[in-house]
Amino acid sequence: MPKKPPAPPPSPQDEALEAAARRARRLLNRRALVAAAASAVPVPGLDWAVDAALLSRLLPQINAEFGLTPGQIDRLDPTQREKVQKAVALVGSALIGKFITRDMVLRLTAAMGVRLTTRQAAKYVPLAGQALSATLGYATVRYLGERHIRDCLQVARAAQLLLPAPDATETIA
């Protein structure tokens, strides 16, 4: 059987994108664990409030990792900015390059309605229900965050965006 030629070395842009994705996933994992803990507490509405607060802070942090905050996009040269805006339009994300509000996050989580309703009902069953609720809370935040990371990767690749070095003023751990 003939051997495949070795894969070409990754470009600096690909390495920067992968590093940004790893940092974003680390942030996402931490926030998803907090969401899981909040979901296990049998207080009505607490998990929704925690999810909205977590996501309204997490999504801008993910944008910052990829150089896709409104401020970062404004600092690009006009042709690069136009490429980013076209890529965002192609991906169809309403959360990239925008100021993210809790209302936007609540609309996003409303799309996950069945999962969230199941989580609300499950938390009142002692132990097993709380464990199920925590698992669903973790999965919901993970799913939404991972989808956003993939959208950011797609936009950055389509726009051939050269990522800035992580900026401590825009990335909050």
Image: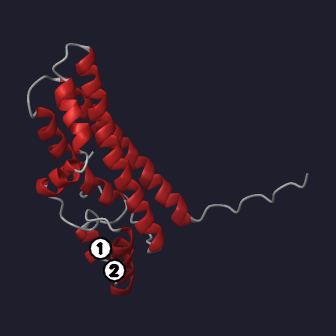
| Type of the residue with mark 1 | Ile
Residue that appears at 26% across and 38% down: 115
Position of 110 relative to 86 (above/below): above
Measured as percent of width and height from the top left, residue 157 is found at: 48, 68
| Type of the residue with mark 2 | Arg
Q: Residues within 10 Å of mark 2 (few under 14, many from 20)?
A: some
Left or right of 1: which side holds 30?
A: left
Q: Residues within 10 Å of mark 1 (few under 14, many from 20)?
A: some
Give 50 or 62, whichever is nearer the viewer. 50
Give 121 or 27, whichever is nearer the viewer. 121
> Which residue matches tag 1?
73
Measured as percent of width and height from the top left, residue 11 is found at: 59, 65
> Which residue matches tag 2?
81
Q: Quadrant of the C terminus?
A: top left
Q: Quadrant of residue 48?
A: top left
Give 71 or 153, whichever is nearer the viewer. 153
Q: Judging from the image, what secondary structure is the residue with disc 1 in?
A: helix
Measured as percent of width and height from the top left, residue 45 is found at: 9, 34
Left or right of 22: which side holds 98?
A: left
Residue that appears at 33% across and 37% down: 139
Q: CA distance from mark 1 to mark 2?
A: 6 Å
Q: Label 2 near label 1: C-beta < 8 Å?
A: yes
Give 24 or 95, whichever is nearer the viewer. 95
Left or right of 10: which side holds 24?
A: left
